[in-house]
Image (spheres, grey):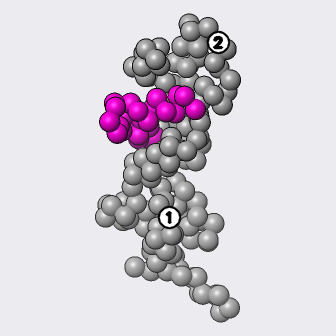
């Protein structure tokens, strides 16, 4: 499939499908990000959307998988709130419904204890933002605003 490929005598442009596969082989991609990369390389929007559709159908490009992986890494290694994480990934161009579902799934993943990832994230968030000085009621209110679940806040209160 050679969509929109143009040749330049000095630097021939790779076939759009091959270029998209090259990007996917280097790192997980998502539709909006891949579309921008393909357009930046000089391919038409129509050709890029066609390739993205084909790659999505085959499962090689999956926005939900990208969101789960991206969020999972940040939950394990950063101290952001669920609200900040959702805002960051939506800011990349991912659809909010896909991002929200992926965030819920990433926070619900557990080792031995249900919500253990969210609880660890909560502890890091409190420490990073110096929220330990707040009253219990104000802390709970702030953490709910930041998107932490009532269940994980109950676990924190029980400690």
Q: Farthest residue in the bottom direction?
A: 9
Q: Main secondary structure of the magenta part?
A: helix
Q: Quadrant of residue 158?
A: top left
In this orientation, does residue 97 appear?
A: no
The vertical placement of 5 against 23, above or below, is: below
Q: Residue at x 64, y 12 (%)?
A: 134
The residue lying toward the viewer, choosing from 5 and 93, is 93
The image's mark for residue 8 is none
**Viewport quadrant of the N terminus:** bottom left
What SS does tag 1 mark? loop
Q: Which residue is mark 2?
A: 134
Q: Which residues are magenta?
A: 98-124
Residue 122 magenta-highlighted: yes
Q: Which residue is mark 1?
A: 27
Mark 1 or 2, closer to the camera: 2
The vertical placement of 137 against 22, above or below, is: above
Image coordinates of residue 36 in percent, x first then y, are 58, 60
Q: Residue at x 42, y 47 (%)?
A: 68
């Amino acid at each position: 499939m050679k969509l929109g490929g143009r040749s330049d005598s000095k630097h021939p442009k790779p076939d759009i499908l091959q270029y998209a596969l090259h990007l996917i082989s280097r790192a997980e991609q998502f539709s909006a990000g891949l579309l921008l990369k393909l357009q930046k390389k000089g391919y038409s929007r129509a050709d890029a959307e066609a390739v993205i559709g084909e790659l999505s159908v085959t499962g090689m490009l999956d926005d939900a998988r990208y969101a789960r992986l991206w969020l999972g890494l940040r939950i394990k290694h950063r101290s952001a709130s669920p609200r900040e994480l959702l805002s960051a990934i939506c800011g990349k161009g991912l659809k909010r419904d896909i991002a929200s579902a992926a965030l819920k799934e990433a926070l619900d993943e557990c080792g031995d204890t249900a919500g253990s990832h969210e609880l660890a994230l909560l502890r890091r968030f409190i420490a990073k933002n110096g929220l330990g000085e707040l009253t219990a009621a104000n802390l709970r209110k702030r953490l709910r605003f930041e998107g932490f679940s009532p269940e994980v806040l109950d676990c924190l209160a029980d400690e």
